[in-house]
Image (cartoon, grey):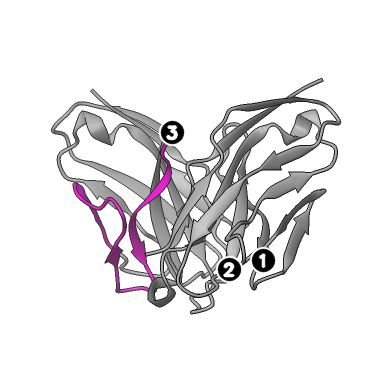
Amino acid sequence: IAGITQAPTSQILAAGRRMTLRCTQDMRHNAMYWYRQDLGLGLRLIHYSNTAGTTGKGEVPDGYSVSRANTDDFPLTLASAVPSQTSVYFCASSGTVSLSGANVLTFGAGSRLTVL
Amino acid sequence: GNSVTQMEGPVTLSEEAFLTINCTYTATGYPSLFWYVQYPGEGLQLLLKATKADDKGSNKGFEATYRKETTSFHLEKGSVQVSDSAVYFCALPWGYSSASKIIFGSGTRLSIRP
């Protein structure tokens, strides 16, 4: 089934450790995104990539980095995890990037990260 | 940039009740507007969208009309079911020059009692 695969599903991590959340899509979508979901705050955009080889900062980029070496993969790295990064992380993709903003996002099932 | 505000929850209704979840936005121009739904344990999925003013998006019995006069995109359903229990998010592009980035409201949790 075409879609987005995220890994791990869940992870408990000690503060200060490095962590990479993986995201792979098989829809050949150009654009990919990372969001975090926190209770009462909805989804906030961390980083995005409009096409392979390019990335950009979202609303809450501090403490996170991304890379987009190819179309399918968009890993999110926490270089030194802190408790405030405890959240559910969603990867998403979009097949179109248009000025009209009519592009639709496809989401992965999420990765629950707990930083102690 | 653009912004969106939606009704806080949680909202609890009985089955077959009428549902309204309010969403208002601030935007430059007339961007597309979206409602996404998140069922328990899953990622978000598109529920409906409207791409221009006065458009009505509809899906699974839900409707929302793009009203530029009131800058609103309220979600409605005439008769809710237990299976509609989920979290609903209003969304729009961050800005005209950054149309690929979608921003979301804080979400409204809906619970339907049998």
**Amino acid type, callout 1:** Ala
* Residue A5 located left or right of residue A8: right
Neighbour tally class for label 3: few under 14, some 14-19, many 20 plus, Cα within 10 Å: few
* Distance in Å between CA atoms under marks 1 and 2: 6 Å
Q: Chain of mark 1?
A: B
**Circle 2 sits on which residue?**
B32
Q: Are marks 3 and 1 in contact (CB under 8 Å)?
A: no
Please give the name of the residue rendered at 59% of the width and 62% of the height, measured from the top-left corner: B33
**Circle 3 sits on which residue?**
A40
* Residue A102 located left or right of residue A13: right
Label disc, if present, on residue B50 of the rendered structure: 1
Residue B100: image location, x then y, percent:
45, 70
Q: Are marks 1 and 2 in contact (CB under 8 Å)?
A: yes
* Distance in Å between CA atoms under marks 2 and 3: 24 Å
What is the quadrant of residue B87 in the picture?
A: top right
Please give the name of the residue rendered at 69% of the width and 31% of the height, measured from the top-left corner: B85
Q: Chain of mark 3?
A: A
